[in-house]
Amino acid sequence: MVEEMLAARGIGVSYETVRQWALKFGQGFANQIRRRLPAAGDKWHLDEVVITIAGRKHWLWRAVDQHGVVLDILVQSRRNAKAAKRLLRKLLKKHGIAPRVVITDKLASYAAAKRVVMPGVEHRQHKGLNNRAENSHQPTRRRERIMKRFKSARQAQRFLSVHDQVANLFRRPANTNAAAHRTSRAQAFRVWAEVTGIAST
């Protein structure tokens, strides 16, 4: 909503200008935010959700830790063991260590991929245990509606990898009172000001 926020301050920019800014600066901001966040938890929740891009089904694979922090996302055209292996390898490469536990729904592709990529990791398959990952799709769905759907798999991957890191920064931790939420929000705005190089207001 940058366009509306700037308009409120009397600065007129087009939606396309904001989009170009996001393409140019977004990934750099996301990388800096990722470095400032605490290390990932040792319990990973994996899930996939269907998204329609240009009339074709694609699958958005997502991994979150036990605190609800999005670890990574991957947009793929398949929902099979090969796609699940690709997600697990990407996660291991990015985080450098395997989790203690992996929690998934009952999709058989996860078990097949985990046996190959992470054979020593405990695997729990249960629909109810995986609500953490299921809930993490909600902000993506909201953005998808606002953007009138994604235009290509590459655009979705690029946008969501930035969007989820920014969302991690401003995420409200579960079971916090109002005072703790205000403190964490103030900290998030301080980090955002450092990352973007603007004075916090």
Image (cartoon, rainbow, N blue to C red):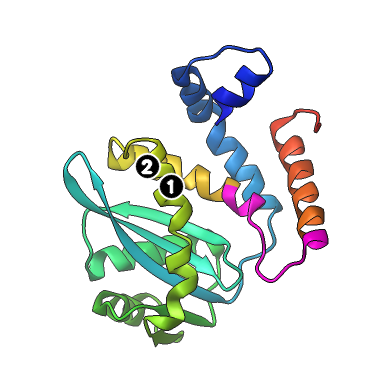
Identity, as a three-letter code, of the amino acid under mark 1: Arg
- The segment highlighted magenta reads 167-180
Q: Quadrant of the N terminus?
A: top right
Residue, disc 1? 142
Q: Is residue 194 above or below residue 38?
A: above
* Residue 119 locus on image (x, y percent): 39, 84
Q: Which mark is residue 145?
A: 2
Residue 143 as seen in the image, left or right of residue 181: left
* Residue 159 locus on image (x, y percent): 44, 40
Q: Nearer the viewer, residue 194 or 127?
A: 127
Marks 2 and 1: in contact by CB < 8 Å?
A: yes
Q: Residue at the location (53% across, 38% down)?
A: 27
Identity, as a three-letter code, of the amino acid under mark 2: Arg
Q: Which mark is residue 186?
A: none
Cα distance, mark 1 to mark 2? 5 Å
Q: Is residue 45 magenta?
A: no
* Residue 143 locus on image (x, y percent): 43, 43
Q: Residue at the location (31% across, 67% down)?
A: 84
Q: Nearer the viewer, residue 123 or 127?
A: 127
Q: Nearer the viewer, residue 143 or 29?
A: 143
